[in-house]
Amino acid sequence: SQKIEQNSEALNIQEGKTATLTCNYTNYSPAYLQWYRQDPGRGPVFLLLIRENEKEKRKERLKVTFDTTLKQSLFHITASQPADSATYLCALPGAGDDKIIFGKGTRLHILP
Amino acid sequence: DGGITQSPKYLFRKEGQNVTLSCEQNLNHDAMYWYRQDPGQGLRLIYYSQIVNDFQKGDIAEGYSVSREKKESFPLTVTSAQKNPTAFYLCATSLQGPPAEQYFGPGTRLTVT
């Protein structure tokens, strides 16, 4: 069955450095991948969508890559700030393509 | 949170009681979704609706029911048949179905004792 894997361990990064989060998937070839940010006790907020024919997508300090050979997406935050601390979720299309499936998320801590 | 309202934010119920969680949107979005999130877990899809008067089961629909009589509203009922109802429930909408981005409400934290 389709499986999405994100690092379950929290990631601690020093302020100003680049944070890199990983999303791996198995058992299918998604046409796109989405990234969301979730703060504690709140609903996720959409950040970026990348399609299978796009190698890289950027938005301000965010960069997402999509390697369909490795079945992996990398999410980068450059010049990280304490306000970037949150849980980041990746999401891929579910069976039937009328829904998406979320990974469990990676908690990111940016240390001042 | 935008134009999505979930109420109440916290809800307490006794075991064996049905409870209905509200989700209202003024974004004029066609698609609406209900997710459940448990501590340390990702979001799991309960039910979704792409259009009024139509909805489909998600991955964990057992013990839940929904209705979509109006475009703006997609209430979720947690029935007594749901074995572990205590969780954080999130409603989401999107302009269309995937890959359209989803907008989430603030969530309802349900505690059943």
Image: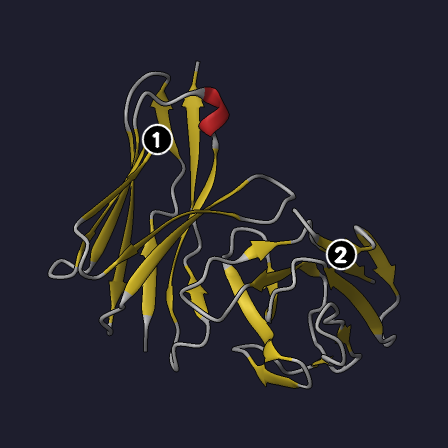
Answer above or below: position of B63 versus B37.
below
Q: Which mark is residue A60?
A: 1
Q: Position of residue B2 (x, y in %)?
A: 66, 47
Disc 1 marks which amino acid? Glu
Q: Nearer the viewer, residue B15 or A95?
A: A95
Q: Chain of mark 1?
A: A
Q: Residue at x 54, y 49 (%)?
A: A44
Q: Three-letter amino acid code at disc 2?
A: Gln
Is A39 positioned to the left or the right of A21 in the image?
A: right
How many marks on residues? Answer: 2
**Rendering quarter of residue B22:** bottom right
In the displayed structure, does residue A28 sit left or right of residue B10?
left
Dot 1: within a 10 Å radius of its alpha carbon, few (fewer than 14), some, or many (20 or more) residues? Answer: few
In the displayed structure, would residue A37 be above or below residue A60?
A: below
Mark 1–mark 2 contact, CB under 8 Å? no
The residue most toward the top is: A112
Residue A53: x %, y % from top left: 17, 60
Indicate the secondary structure of the residue bearing disc 2: strand
Seen at 47% across and 57% down, the residue is: B101
Q: Which mark is residue B6?
A: 2
Q: Is residue A4 above or below residue A81?
A: below
